[in-house]
Amino acid sequence: LGRWFMLGTLATLLPLMIVLSRDFGVTWDEPTRQRYGEEVLEYYQGKISLYHFQTDGARLYGGLFDLTAVWLQHLAMHRIPLLWRMHAVHHSDRDLDVTTALRFHPFELVVSTLYKSAWVVFLGAPVLVTLAFELWLNANALFNHSNIKLPPRADRWLRRFIVTPDMHLVHHSIIPSDQHQNYGFALTIWDRIFGTYAAYQSLQAIGLASAQDERPAKAAWSMALPFRKFN
C-alpha cells in the first residue's frame, strides 16, 4: 500500500510541478520598450504567458484525467465488490469487439459520470478540454476493444504509449488474475508505473468463468447480473 501511495502521489504531482516550475515570462528589447511603453508590453506579456499556461494546462488536465478519472476508477471497479458487480456486465461479453466498449450496466454509467464530474470540478478543467478528452478516451476505448489484429511490430510500438487490442485482451481473460492487469483505457504509462502491465494473455478464452454460455447475450440477464450471485 505504501508503494502504491508513493507512486500515485508522484505520478499525480510531477506533471503539476513541471508546469508550475516553468518560466512563462517574455522579455522585450530596449527599442521595443521605448516604442510601445511599459504598460502596453506588460499587458501583452500577460496574454502570452496565459496562452502558454493554458496550452500546457490542457496537457496536464489530460494526463491527470487519464490517471484519476479513468485508470483509478477502473481499478476501483475491480477491487470494490459492489462496483465489480456492475462492471462484471462489461466483462461478461464473450465476443470482444467494438460493441464491448459500449456494454456497461446503467448503474455503472451513473457512478462513472458522477465520479468523472467530481474530478472535473476538483481540477477546474475547462469545458472544451473535458469534451476533447472524452472524445479521445472513447475513440481509444473503441479501438482497444476491437477485434483488429495489428502486425506484431506495430503493436509493440503502439503499446509504448496507448492501449492496443491485444494488450486489452489480456484484461478480458476469464482468469481473475488476468482481469487485474492492464487497467488502462488509453495510456499505458499507469499500468507500467503501478506494476499491472502484462504483455501477453495467459488464456485465450474471455468473459466470466461462471458464464461461458449464451446467457451474457441476453439483455435481461445482463441487467440482473449485479443482483445475482456469481464468481
Image (cartoon, rainbow, N blue to C red):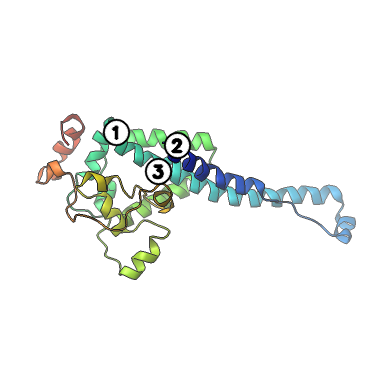
At mark 2, the secondary structure is helix
Residue positioned 30% across, 54% down in the render = 168
Residue positioned 31% across, 36% down in the render = 79
Q: Is residue 171 above or below residue 109?
A: below
Q: Residues within 10 Å of mark 3 (few under 14, many from 20)?
A: many
Task: Say what amino acid the circle numbered 1 marks.
Answer: Leu
Marked residue nearer the N-terminal end (2 or 1): 2
Name the foreground residue: 117 vs 193.
193
Residue positioned 23% across, 39% down in the render = 88
Q: Which residue is mark 2?
A: 2
The label shown at residue 70 is 3
Q: Residues within 10 Å of mark 2 (few under 14, many from 20)?
A: few
Marked residue nearer the N-terminal end (3 or 2): 2
Residue 180 image offset from top left, x and y in percent: 29, 44
Q: Is residue 220 above or below residue 155?
A: above
Marked residue nearer the N-terminal end (1 or 3): 3
Q: Residues within 10 Å of mark 1 (few under 14, many from 20)?
A: some
Q: Is residue 74 left or right of residue 8?
A: left
Using the rendered image of the protein, determine whether residue 126 is visible from the camera's viewpoint: no
User: Quarter of the image containing the C terminus?
Assistant: top left
Task: Say what amino acid the circle numbered 2 marks.
Answer: Gly
Q: CA distance from mark 2 to mark 1?
A: 24 Å
Name the foreground residue: 77 vs 181.
181
The label shown at residue 83 is 1
